[in-house]
Amino acid sequence: MVNKDNIYILTRIELKNSSADKFKEGDVVICNGYFIEIEYGVYDIPGLLTKVTTRYDMRYLPIHKQPYYIQDFIHRRDIREVTP
C-alpha cells in the first residue's frame, strides 16, 4: 500500500484483505484504474455514499457496473473484538 496524504494505492490482493471502514471520510483508494472515494455522511458505515469512478471515465459507476471485489471492499465490515 502506498499512501500519499489521503490517497491510497492498493493492489487487488490488498483491497481484498481490507475494508472501506478502515479509511476515513475523504480518503481516495486507487486500485486497477478504479478510484474509490470514501464517504460516510451521516452514517456510521461508508457503504451507502462511497463512490467509484474509473481512470478513463470520471462518471460515478452504478453499483451493478462495479467489479465484485470493489463491492466486497466497500460492504465488508472490519471485524472487531467484542468484550462482554
Image: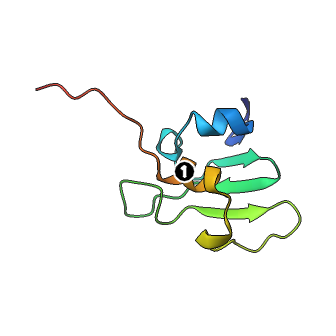
Quadrant position of residue 58: bottom right
Q: Residue at x 70, y 72 (%)?
A: 60
Quadrant position of residue 15: top right
Quadrant position of residue 78: top left
In the rendered image of this protein, does residue 21 appear above or below residue 71? above
Q: Residue at x 46, y 58 (%)?
A: 40
What percent of the width, then of the height, locates residue 6?
67, 42
The answer to whether residue 82 is left or right of residue 43 is left
- Find the residue positioned furthest to the right: 56
**Quadrant (top left/top right/bottom left/bottom right) for the C terminus:** top left
Secondary structure beneath disc 1?
Answer: helix
Q: Nearer the viewer, residue 4 or 82?
A: 82
Q: Residue at x 61, y 72 (%)?
A: 64
The answer to whether residue 74 is left or right of residue 34 is left
What percent of the width, then of the height, locates residue 19?
52, 41
What percent of the width, then of the height, locates residue 38?
57, 54
Crowd band around label 1 with a 10 angstrom C-alpha radius: few (<14), some (14–19), many (20+): some
The answer to whether residue 81 is left or right of residue 24 is left
In the rendered image of this protein, does residue 67 appear above or below residue 27? below
Q: Nearer the viewer, residue 44 or 80?
A: 80
Q: Residue at x 54, y 50 (%)?
A: 72
The answer to whether residue 55 is left or right of residue 13 is right
User: The residue under label 1 is which amino acid type?
Assistant: Asp
Quickly name the residue at label 1.
72
